[in-house]
Structure formats: structure tokens, C-alpha cells
Image (tube, rainbow, N blue to C red):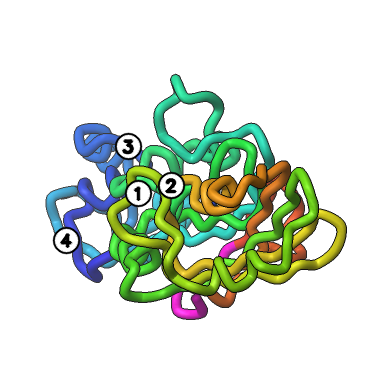
């Protein structure tokens, strides 16, 4: 967030209240700027200097969380698509502008690492194909994969239905009975499921283990931790 911003807009963007309510809160003496009562919410201030109801503002520099997504939740904001991952977050975060959004999406039945932020520029950087952010998935298949799939995935020639460009080379390691690890540098719709389907396999479980330098290890299912965007 810019260092100086109108106080009413700041409170509204951080999900506290509408701009009109900000005026009423100032009138009630609930807002301080550098320890001095705010009387004019159209004044500009640094969010780090504002105290509301005796508390500093929540995450004035943006929200960056790494969630271990459970199965059964969707990444869409549309509630008609089912319960979404945002239901796991504090309600005030959901009132922020820009909205908190996932960095790319995981399918409803996919588990594992999902980054969520209100930093739209960060989202665009992370999902842009030019940045090649590496994602590692653990995959369980309906039958044991043939070794020939390793070269197929690495070839950069798999053309999925309704796509105009082939998938970028992907890493495939066969781990054990029906288990493998896939590394992607992109994120097409249902990409891993469709890549295996192209060779007659079905994915029976899918879990994202890492996203860039971040890992889901140590995060309990349904829980999240904060991360430093510079570390990704
Ligand atoms: N590939 C898929 O098929 N689904 C996901 O959720 C992620 C990658």
C-alpha cells in the first residue's frame, strides 16, 4: 500500500468500514494518527501511523498466506460453486479491496499448498508463464505409470484438448506403487489430470507440495501461515 493515503479510503480498503462509517468513527474519537485524534478522514496518512480502537491496523502492507488446502473447498469466489477456501480466513480480510485471491487455482478435490494474497501484482507475477515459477505435485494414479511417460512429459509436445499450445516440458518421477511426482512451470486448467488422461491414466489423488521456494510441510490441513513475498 502507498505510504500516504486518504484515511477513509485506507480504512475501507483494509476492510474496516465504509468511507462514510470512517467519518462517524473519527467523530466518535476512535481513530488516531501518530497519537493525535483524527477529525478529518479526507486527510492523508501512513497506514502504519493509524490506530483504530486502540489497535494498529491489520496487515497494512498486504496479506500473504500459504494455506494447506483441504479437499472439498473451491478456489472460486462464487458461493454457488460450493464452500470456498476464503471461508477459512478472518471475515475482515474478505472485506478488503483489492480482494484476497488465490495465486492460480487448485481443483476442489486437490489438496496442498495454495497461496492467497490481496497483492494483485504478486498474483500476476506468480502466474505469468514468463516467470516459470516451479510447482511440485504428488500424484496417485489408477494404475502404475509406464516409464515411457517420463520422456513424454519432458518432451514439451503434449497438446491437450482445446489448447493451442503444447504443455511446457514437465518433470515426472515415478515414486512407487501408482505414486509419482510432477513438476510444472505453468498452470493450465486441470493440467495434471489432463496430461495423464492423454495417456489413459486417471488421477485418483493430487496434492501440491511446493510453490516456488515455499513448501506445505509443517502447515496443518485447513491452516495457514504467513510468507514473505520476496522469498518466493
Ligand atoms: N492440475 C490439476 O489437474 N488440478 C489441480 O488442482 C492442479 C494441477
The alpha-carbon separation of the residues under discs 4 and 3 comes to 17 Å
Residue 89 sits above or below residue 120 on the image: above
- Furthest-right residue in this view: 177
- Region of the chain picked out in magenta, as a range: 226-232
- For mark 1, what is the residue? 14
Of 169 and 118, which appears nearest the observer? 169
Residue that label 4 marks: 44
- Quadrant in which residue 26 is drawn: top left
Query: Closer to the observer: label 1 or label 4?
Result: 1
Residue contact at pointers 1 and 4, CB within 8 angstroms: no
As for residue 165 lying within the magenta part, the answer is no
Confirm or reject: label 2 Cβ below 8 Å from ligand 1: yes
Could you tell me residue 107's position as x and y percent?
Answer: 55, 41
Mark pair 3, 1: CA separation: 8 Å
In the rendering, at what x and y percent does residue 92 appear? 45, 40
Residue 17 numbered tag: 3
Give the secondary structure at mark 4.
strand
Pinpoint residue 177: horizontal percent, then vertical percent: 86, 57
18 or 112, nearer to the observer: 112
* Residue at which label 2 appears: 189
Query: Does any portion of residue 180 appear in the rendered image?
Result: yes
* Badge 4: residue crowd in 10 Å (few <14, some 14–19, many ≥20): some
Residue at 76 percent of width and 53 percent of height: 220
Disc with the residue nearer the chain's start (2 vs 3): 3
Dot in front, 2 or 4 = 2
Disc 2 to disc 3, C-alpha distance: 36 Å
Tell which circle, 4 or 3, labels the residue nearer the N-terminal end: 3
Q: Of 201 and 46, which appears nearest the observer?
A: 201
Amino acid at each position: 500500500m502507498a505510504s500516504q493515503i486518504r484515511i477513509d479510503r485506507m480504512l475501507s480498503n483494509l476492510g474496516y468500514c465504509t468511507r462514510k462509517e470512517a467519518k462517524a468513527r473519527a467523530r466518535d474519537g476512535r481513530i488516531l494518527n501518530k497519537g493525535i485524534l483524527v477529525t478529518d478522514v479526507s486527510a492523508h496518512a501512513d497506514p502504519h501511523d493509524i490506530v483504530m480502537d486502540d489497535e494498529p491496523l491489520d496487515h497494512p502492507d498486504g496479506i500473504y498466506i500459504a494455506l494447506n488446502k483441504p479437499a472439498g473447498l473451491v478456489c472460486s469466489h462464487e458461493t454457488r460453486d460450493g464452500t470456498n477456501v476464503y471461508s477459512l480466513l478472518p471475515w475482515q480480510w474478505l472485506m478488503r479491496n483489492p480482494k484476497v485471491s488465490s495465486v492460480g487455482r487448485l481443483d476442489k478435490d486437490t489438496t496442498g499448498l495454495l497461496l492467497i494474497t490481496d497483492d494483485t501484482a504478486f498474483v500476476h507475477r506468480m502466474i505469468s508463464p514468463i516467470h516459470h515459477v516451479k510447482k511440485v505435485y504428488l500424484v496417485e494414479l489408477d494404475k502404475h505409470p509406464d516409464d515411457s511417460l517420463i520422456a513424454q512429459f519432458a518432451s514439451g509436445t503434449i497438446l491437450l484438448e482445446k489448447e493451442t499450445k503444447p504443455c511446457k516440458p514437465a518433470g515426472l518421477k515415478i515414486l512407487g506403487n501408482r505414486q509419482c511426482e510432477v513438476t510444472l512451470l505453468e498452470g493450465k486448467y486441470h493440467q495434471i489430470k489432463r496430461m495423464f488422461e492423454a495417456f489413459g491414466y486417471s488421477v485418483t489423488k493430487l496434492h501440491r507440495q511446493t510453490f516456488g521456494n515455499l513448501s506445505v510441510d509443517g502447515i496443518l490441513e485447513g491452516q495457514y501461515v504467513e510468507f514473505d513475498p520476496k522469498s518466493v
